[in-house]
Amino acid sequence: MCLYGLISQACVNIILNIMITPLFPPEFTEQTIVPVGMLGESIHTYQSDLQTGLVQLSYPDYPTLTLLFVRGQLVTVYRDMPKEVERLAPLNWLDSIDGSSQRTALRTLALTPQDVRVFKILIEQQNDANCFVMGGSGFEPKLANWLDHPSAALGQVCWPNAEALVLFPGLGVHPNYSLIMKERQILHSSSGLSEIINWNEPIKSLGYFGSEALTPAWKEYLLHNSFSFLVINLMGKYEKLIGRLQLNQIVKDVNFKATAHDWNLSIHINSVNDQCVFSSPESAAEVYSRLLEVVITQLRSMLGPAILEMLLKDMTGQLSLPARRVVDEYFLLLKI
C-alpha cells in the first residue's frame, strides 16, 4: 500500500528508523512520511481535530523536532541538539524550517494532558546521562529509595518491548499516576505499581529524573501540583470557618473565572481537575495566581492579612523544597 500514492509503507519504516531520534521505540507510534510542501497542512489537520499528543518531525541534516499539543493547541516545541534539548517559541517554529524542499518523517503518539506534562519532563532531561542506570537488575530494589526521596521525581523503566513512566510525589507518598507504553498502546494506572513490578521482561535500563533539576517542565509541573495542594487545603479551612453553603459560592466564582478565560480547569470541594498545559512556567503561574486570588481574597477578608500570611506559610512549608522554591519564585501573591 502506498502513502499519498508516492512511498511504500516499507520505505516509510526504513526512513523513519534512520531519521528520527528514538525518544522511545518507533513501534510505539503512528509513523508516516509527509510529502514535500505538505507539513503545514498536516499540522493544521492535527490541530483542527483537537488532538492531544506528541508529534515528532525529522528532516535530512536537521535536528529532530518534537511538538506537544493539548486539544489542538501547540503548547511546546523542542529541538533535539547534540548535547541539549532546546525549547522553541510555538508561534514561529515553522518559520525556521524550509519544509517546501524536503520530505518530513513524522511520528505521532496520542496522549492525555497529564501525559504531556510527563513527556515534557522526560524530553528536557533525556540527555542527562546521570539520570540513567543502564542494565538495571530490577525495579523493586530501587523502589524503596525512590519512594523515600524527599521531592517529586519521574521514574522510567525500559524493557525490550515496553516502557513505563511513573510520577513519584516524594516524601514517601505512593505514586498515583503511571503509564506503560507498548506497540501503539498506552496503559494508564492510578492504582499502584504492581503491573510494572510484575512485567514479564528483563529490564534494559532504569531512569530517575529528580525535580531538583528545576527544568521549565518541572517548574510547570510543580506549579500545577502546588496550586492543587493549596486550593484543596484552603477549601478545607474555608469549610470549617464559613460552612459548605458559602464555600460552594467560592467554588462557583473560581470555576466561572476559569471558564470565562477558556482555562480547562475546575475546582471542587475536595479536588481539582486541572487539564491545563502551558507553554512556560510564567504562563502557568499567571493562571494559577489569578485563580488563587479569588480564593485568598475571600479568606483575607475573614481572617485579616497577618493570620492569612501565617496560614499560607504553614501550607507552603508542607511542600517539598523544589516546590517551595517554585512557589516563591512565581506565586508573588503569596508574599502579600
Image (cartoon, rainbow, N blue to C red):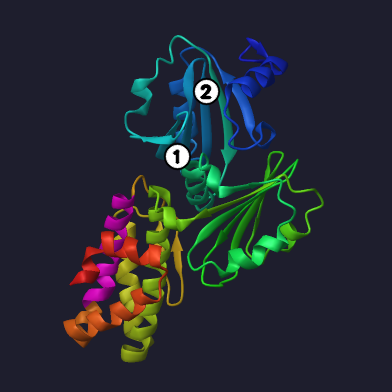
Q: Residues within 10 Å of mark 2 (few under 14, many from 20)?
A: many
- Name the one closer to the observer, 134 or 309: 134
- Tag of residue 153: none
* Nearer-N-terminus badge (2/1): 2
- Tag of residue 58: 2
User: Which mark lies nearer to you, 2 or 1?
Assistant: 2
Q: Is residue 21 above or below residue 241?
A: above
- Name the one closer to the observer, 255 or 107: 107
- Name the one closer to the observer, 288 or 158: 158
Residue 92 in the image: x percent, y percent? 32, 28
Instruction: Judge whether residue 187 can be spotted in this image.
Output: yes
Which residue bears the numbered disc 1? Answer: 72
Instruction: Judge whether residue 175 can be spotted in this image.
Output: no
Q: Say which quarter of the image contains residue 76.
A: top left
Q: Say which quarter of the image contains residue 1.
A: top right
Quarter the C terminus occupies: bottom left
Q: Which residue range is magenta in the image?
A: 281-297
The structure residue drawn at horizontal position 68% and vertical position 21%, both measured from the top left corner, is: 13
Magenta highlight on residue 314: no
